[in-house]
Image (cartoon, rainbow, N blue to C red):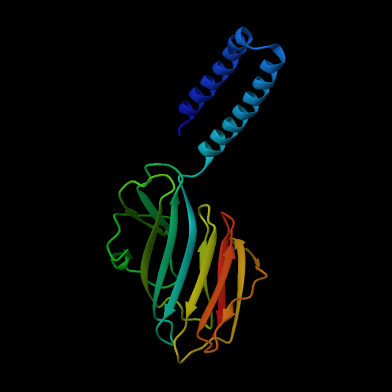
Amino acid sequence: MNRSNWREEVIGLISLILGLPSFLLLVLQGQIVIGILVGILCLLTVIVVWLRFDRERPALTTLKVVKELTINDKNGSKAVLLHRVQIRANRKGVDRFCFSGISSDGTIDPESIEIDGQKPNEKGSAAGLRRVCKIFPPMQRGDTKNIVMSIPAINAFPSEEESLVHGVNEETKLLKMVVNLPADRTVRDAWSCIGVGGDIKDSGQAPEIDSSFRRLEIEFKNPKEGIEYSLCWRW
C-alpha cells in the first residue's frame, strides 16, 4: 500500500466517524449512541494502527536462511557454498529475490553462480560486491517460496583460521550456518562472532561439532538487520 492510498483510507474512516453521530442520534437514545461511538472509535483505532504497520512492513520476510559451505580438499582451494532461503510475501506482487553482498577471499567466477540450478535473471556489482537476482511469477500475500543459490569458490579458504560470514540485510526469522570439512583435515576448534565492520565480538553461542570433527553447525534466531554473523574455525 503506498502513502497516498493509506491517507485516503484514513480520511474515509474519519469522514465515517464524523457522520455517524448525527445519524445515530436520529434513531437511538443518547447513552446508547455514546456506547456505540466509543466501540467504533476503538475499532477504527485498531484499523489505523494495523494499516500503518502494514504500510511500513518490507515487501517480504526471510523466514529462514541456511548457508552451507562444503570444502572439498585440505588446502581449501575447492569449495561450494549453498545459500538457501525461504521467503514470505508481505504484500501482493513480489516477483523477485536478490542475493547481495557476494564476495570471497578467493576467486568466484560470476558465470558459475546459479540460482535454483539456472543462471541468475539479473546481475550487478558495487564496491566489489556482487548481486544476483531471481525473477519469478508475482506472489500473493502470504505465499512462501524456497530459493537456492550455489557459488563455487577457488582458493578461498587457505588459512589455518577461517570463517563463514553472513550479513543480515532484511528481516530474518532464523539463520543457520553449516561448514563441512574434508576427511583429511578436521576441525581443531570452533566459535562464532557477531559485529559490524571491525567491531567484532564473541556471540556467546558455541557451534555444534559432530563426532567426525568434520561438520560445524550453528543457529541464530531472529538475527538483527545490519549485523554480520560469523562461524569461525581452526583446522
Residue at the extreme front: 28
Query: Does 189 sit above or below residue 138?
Result: below
Residue pictured at 49% horizontal, 57% vertical: 63
Residue 102 appears anywhere in the view: no
The answer to whether residue 77 is seen in the rendering is: yes
- Which quadrant of the rendered structure holds the N terminus? top left
Location of the C terminus (image quadrant): bottom right
Above or below for 180 versus 138: below
The residue nearer to you, when weighing 19 against 67, is: 19
Q: Which residue is painted at 41% across and 73% down in the image?
A: 106
Q: Nearer the viewer, residue 19 or 230?
A: 19
Image coords of residue 72 (percent x, y):
40, 83
Q: Is residue 44 left or right of residue 150?
A: right
Please state the horizontal and vertical placement of residue 20, each as a whole percent of the image.
Answer: 59, 14
| 130 or 172: nearer the viewer | 172
Name the spot of residue 228 as percent of width and height, x first.
Answer: 56, 62
